[in-house]
Image (cartoon, rainbow, N blue to C red):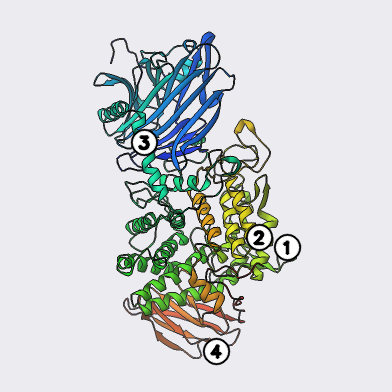
Amino acid sequence: MSSTSELPPGAPGLDPRWTSSAKSGVGTAMTAASRIWFTLSHGILNEIYYPRVDAACTRDFGLVVAGPDGYFSEEKRDADHEVSMMEEGVPAFRLSNTARDRRYRIEKEILTDPRREALLQRITFEALEGELADYRLYALLSPHLVNAGANNTAWVGDYKGTPMLFASGPRGVSVALACSVPWLARSVGFVGASDGWQNLSRGEPLNQAYQLAEHGNVALSGEIDLTPGKGHALLALGFGVRPDEAGYRALSSLQDGFESARKLYAHGWRAWQDSLLPLDRPAGSSNLNRYRISTAVLATHQPTSFPGAAIASLSIPWGFSKGDEDLGGYHLVWPRDLVETAGGFLAAGATAYARDILAYLMSIQEEDGHWSQNVWLDGTPYWSGVQMDECAFPLLLADMLHRSGHLERDELARFLPMIEKAARYVAVNGPVTAQDRWEEDAGYSPFTLAVEIAGLLAAADLMDTFGRKRAARYLRETADSWNDDIEYWTFAKDTELAQRLGISGYYVRIAAPETADAASPLEGFVPVKNRPPSEMSQLAAMLISPDALALVRFGLRAPDDPRILDTIAAIDATLRAELPQGPIWYRYNGDGYGEHEDGAPFNGVGIGRPWPLLSGERAHYELAAGRIEVAEQLLTTLEESASIGGLLPEQVWDATDIPERELFHGRPSGSAMPLVWAHSEHIKLLRSLRDGAVFDMPPQTVERYQKRGVTSPVRSWRFCQKIRTISGGKSLRIELQAPAIVHWTTDDWATIHDTPTAPNDFGIDLVTLPTSEAAVGTIIRFTLYWPQADRWENADFAVTVDPARSPPPVRRPLGPSGALKAPL
């Protein structure tokens, strides 16, 4: 440290915050040697991730311009921005930032060095008014090392005599910033008090006495000498475990130069894009190849260093309002999103990536067979919930890979333990989910039911491959039983909304779990988690969601099933938003996950906004129904919901413009962008339209329920699902986790039966009671004796025989793909 240095005031700085989630570009090199992922927004770099795609290490990295008479301009706030890929399908970017006062323009080219962990930013500064010598250009970097903006340390230093700016964090990561032209001044400080922005915004030079800022929310600032390069400079940001390692990488990357890195970077991406199926479409007025943007987004979010892992988004929704308490953001692995991503890779022909995802899922599966709600790359859970669709989706992926010839029998054998554990977990713990796919409520969700049932049938086919006939039979019986009850659990009839719309009823968003001492699931109440406490409790029968379309997407119900058609009418009457790009749907009525009415960011409550990916899901329904033109129109709606750089957001703004909050009608809101799940849906829709059939529709459900009309002779009672009724004509099956003797009666204990359970191939002890001939109104009473513990359960249970329910109808014949043979 220089003898003239002084400690910058204001420690530890403002409470750290992240930045905008509205990314205009994301990128990384296609090499294992470069473990850096970058994001762009508002014409600058913001979150940069190292050494893992789930570890954000910067908040933002931009430029400030100063000039005569106290002139101050920050490119991210005071310029108009243009962004484009350097080459089609190659996520290296050109940025053009033109000052709104027309005094300067900054051109930037950004990529990561494929040979090492450094990020390069080639800059050209152009004076549009006056001379180059009239201006001073500054680089400002805000490190938030390993998902934390607090407790970082920054200093002015050098590596082997090359002047640099450094920062280190408490989790063993350092950064070094170097420049190809001299630094005229360097300074570090605490954000909001003594950082370089504070000096420059007041018309003051950088305070070079500030050479060390310890243990706080810090910022690095350096003045770039514009003279030697006549406005051209190359900035290199190196990363490493130690400061010297980061300095070495920054310097060696500068010495190799930008062109060397660009050629290797582009070559890697070109080679990968060339290996994909040609699903490209005409660029249109946007001049963007939407397909190649989506494939690049998927590959950017799957790190080479963790084959098969892919995070949900390189963003933090409403990040500018969130701090270190939100460690995860969306840079976590959600098993559901991961399987959706695998489907996108498969649809594009990147089968090796999809196989890697299945292998990764096997590695992070929990011992009992489930997958955690979301995890860090190494499989460590972040949130502790369990979502049953996430536990069933991997079964569908294994089956899809096997059916498409990308997983031969010998290779499939190594996944059999994963498949068996997952199938057992779903069969034992379903069909009720502790959280629906929106991660909020417990109960019977049509989406979750569709995935569970399709997953069990897929697992049964895989079990058959290895001669596991008894195991396969049990999984199919369980799936059949649940399929029979979908309408009992989730189809609401004769409601006020149904009467108003002139329909018989509709599938609800989610119904309350069934218990022995409660009313029917549809008469229960559901807590809508993102609403104020006074508005949370809602009657299940009044909650609607496009989730019901999963019953068609996964083959359980035909697209022309009258109940589906009625549900479509209810969905469109309550959840359809007409926006400039076309119709987009809300997740469910009363949703609170989105900005407030005044555009303030979501803070635990808000107002749900439309989700473009739901237009993709609706397009798949329309394709299944034979309405190809409608599906094509919805593809356009999905694509035109993207940012100017072609990235798809989680949500779009549905109200009048609020320019001061950057919210514009029909454009991306402050939620996550890009949403990898949405880009996966986009790729699958392109593939489905090319094939003329829904790409990821499982054939087992279509064959079993739509063509053959298979129903179940049993209904199961478990401790996790103490059913209160059984349909007339069905037998009552008792399923337990230990051997027992079922002590039961159908005539109020006048006649008593003792029937022992027997274990099946999954270690589940079960017995089917011969109750199929019991009259309507019969009460089946039973208790349990546990021989291993030599004790009685000390409680009686009762199941009442109800009138027989109508089975799901068999629809007219379908094509082999699951699409209707002729348009409706």
Helix, strand or loop status at disc 1: helix
- The residue located at (56%, 70%) in the rendering is 486
- Report the residue marked by disc 4: 773
- Report the residue marked by disc 3: 263
Whichever of labels 2 and 1 marks the residue nearer the N terminus, that label is: 1
Q: Quadrant of residue 542?
A: bottom right
Q: Are marks 4 and 2 in contact (CB under 8 Å)?
A: no
Q: CA distance from mark 3 to mark 1?
A: 64 Å
Whichever of labels 4 and 2 marks the residue nearer the N terminus, that label is: 2
Q: CA distance from mark 3 to mark 2?
A: 57 Å
Q: Quadrant of residue 255?
A: top left
Which of the two marks, 3 or 2, is nearer to us in this view? 3
- Is the N terminus in the top left, top right, bottom left or bottom right quadrant? top left
Q: What amino acid is labelled 3 in the image?
A: Lys
- Report the residue marked by disc 1: 496
Residue 576 visible somewhere in the drawing: yes
Q: CA distance from mark 4 to mark 2?
A: 36 Å
| x and y percentages locating residue 530 in the rendered image | 57, 48
